[in-house]
Each structure stands twice: as structure tokens, then as C-alpha cells.
Amino acid sequence: MTTNSVTENLMNLPPNVDIRKAFNTEPTPRDYVLPSFPVGKVGLLASAGGTGKSFYALQMLFQVSAGRCCDFSLGKTSMSNDPCQVLYVSLEDEAQDIESRLNALWQYWKSDKEKSGWLDDLADFVEIIGLAGLGSTLVDSSGENTACFNAITEKAQSMPCLRFIVVDTLRRAHDGDENSNGFMSQVLRYFEKLAHTTGAAILLLHHENKGGMGDMDAGSSSVRGASAIVDNARYVARMQTMTPDEAKKRGMSDDDRRFFVRVTLEKTNYGPPQEGAWLRRENGGILIAKEPPCINNKQSGGDNGAKTFSKKYKTAKDIFG
């Protein structure tokens, strides 16, 4: 290797971190899209199939886009930003399916003058791209980003007020082996670069493995595929339908417990831990912050069980600020 080639390689490196400047300068406060999930980073939302993560993510788009100006009873995001642009890339559901969810969202709020007015206004801030059924992928089997990925990047870069991108789902975004640490690290690097270049937080929707289904304590180990997926994500949240055991403690029927979904933050690199949250599935599949009945003391073994529950689960609003 010649001296000139070494110099050229060095020129491609970013500047060194200024250590003394860091010692003597207050860090810039992080800008959070969701509590403990800052802009410019990549995160995961994992659940078993049919839990409602796609609908939940769609609702989050509108809540993040509205910022502090309107609360759609989703449990609140950080609510610190002005209205902003958001982008939803669906590789799993076709346009007709997405339109059905949007209609359900509108039907739920249309009688509320404030919220319906905001939903109508936010239609200009929420961008939705439906790629399902078109054979599109973002990363091919050789680990190269595709023309479709480049088009999504250009779209995102054309949105000057973009803060939040949802990709539904991670499995559909690539053609490789999701159990390969090397391949999945490469996939996550593409999304990290997209987050860096756009300044937006990117939430990848993903599935749970069979071992994690129904295990409320499985944590991030419930995420399907290579360990590199969780390792490279800076934020990992989880959605679960209430388990039969949990319903029994609360004196709920098996039918009723299926309407309740628990959201937990299993990993965060850039913020404090957050409490778990409960959401209830309403007409059309929309999810609304709602606490289930309290644990039955007789079922749980006395007051200690109730106290433990009150510490572990607060209202759904607590997880989002």
C-alpha cells in the first residue's frame, strides 16, 4: 500500500472526537420521538402475529405527527414536538388493508371535533407507502441495498420535517437469513445510515420467536432471529396479548382478556427504563390506553400481590411520558 493510498483512506475517516471539548461542554439534550427512543436511532417493536403491532404503529404515526398539539389516547408519546412529518413503509399489508385501518381510526374519532380536525390536518404530514404485493425488498439476498431502498431514502430526504419512520416488517424488508448475525448486522447498518442521514427515528416492526409467545418475562430474548437484531437496535419494545394466567389473577374471562394488550420497553440505550402499559382493543382494531381490572387479591395471594402489580404496571400513559 502506497503512502498516497494511506492518506486517501485517512481522509475518508470522520474527525476525531474532541475529548476535551466533551469534558467541558454540557451535552445537547436528546430529542425523543418516544420516551427513551431518540431521533436518529433504530429501534424494534416485536410481537406475535395478530397482536396488532401494525395498527398500533399506524396510530403512533399520527400521535408523533401531532406532537404536543393533540392526544389521541394512545398513552401519549413524549408530546414535546410541534407537528411533524412521519413516514410509514408497509411491506406486509396492501393499500386496501391500510385504508381499512385508517377508516377505523377516523370512525372512532369522527365525533370528536378536535381530534377529527387534527386527523384531517395530519393527512398532509403522514406519508404511507404500500409495497406489499409488488415483490419489493429493501436488502437483497447478497446483502446489498436495492433500488427500492434507495427510493425510500430519497423520499425520506425530501421530507424536511421528518421525525419518525416505521418499516413493517423487518422480515419483509430483506431476502436473507434472519438467523445470520452477519447478514442481519448488515441490514441494521443500512437502517442506521438512513436514520443518520434523515435525522429520523426508525422503528422496525418484527415478530417474536415461538419460545417467547405467552411468556411475559421473556424480554428481548423473545425477538425472533439472530441476536444481532436486538444487539444492534438501540430501543426494543414488545407487545403481548394478556395471557390466561394474567387474566385469571384479575378475574377476567378468556374472551375479555383477548382485548387487552401489554406494551413493555425491553431495551433502551439512550434513556431511562419505562413502566409497562396496557391498551384495550376497540371497534375496528384501534388500541386505546385503558387499565384492565385490578388483580384479585384472593387469586394473587393477598395484598402483597396487589402491591407488586401496582409497582410493576402503571397507566398506559406512563410508558409514553
Image (spheres, rainbow, N blue to C red):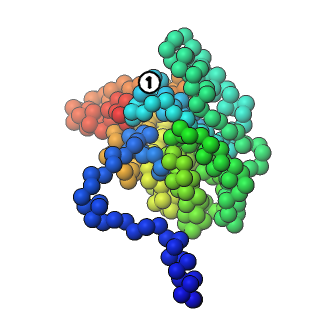
Viewer-nearest residue: 206 or 233: 233
Viewer-nearest residue: 12 or 282: 12
Residue 176: horizontal and vertical position, in percent?
66, 61
Q: Give the left or right position of residue 167, taking residue 41 as reference.
A: right
Query: Disc 1 residue type?
Result: Cys
Residue 87: horizontal and vertical position, in percent?
59, 39
* Res 300 quadrant in image: top left
Residue 82: horizontal and vertical position, in percent?
45, 30
The reply to whether residue 176 is visible in this rendering is: yes
Instruction: Find numbered disc 1 in the image and state the secondary structure of the residue it sits on.
Output: helix
220, above or below 70, in the image: below
Q: Residue at x 51, y 53 (%)?
A: 196
215, above or below 296, in the image: below
Viewer-nearest residue: 227 or 29: 29
Quadrant of the drawing holding the C terminus: top left
Q: Residue at x 60, y 46 (%)?
A: 157
The residue pinned by badge 1 equals 69
Q: Residue at x 41, y 25 (%)?
A: 290
The reply to whether residue 222 is visible in this rendering is: no
Q: Give the left or right position of residue 134, taking residue 87 as reference.
A: right
Q: Residue at x 44, y 40 (%)?
A: 33
* Res 182 quadrant in image: bottom right
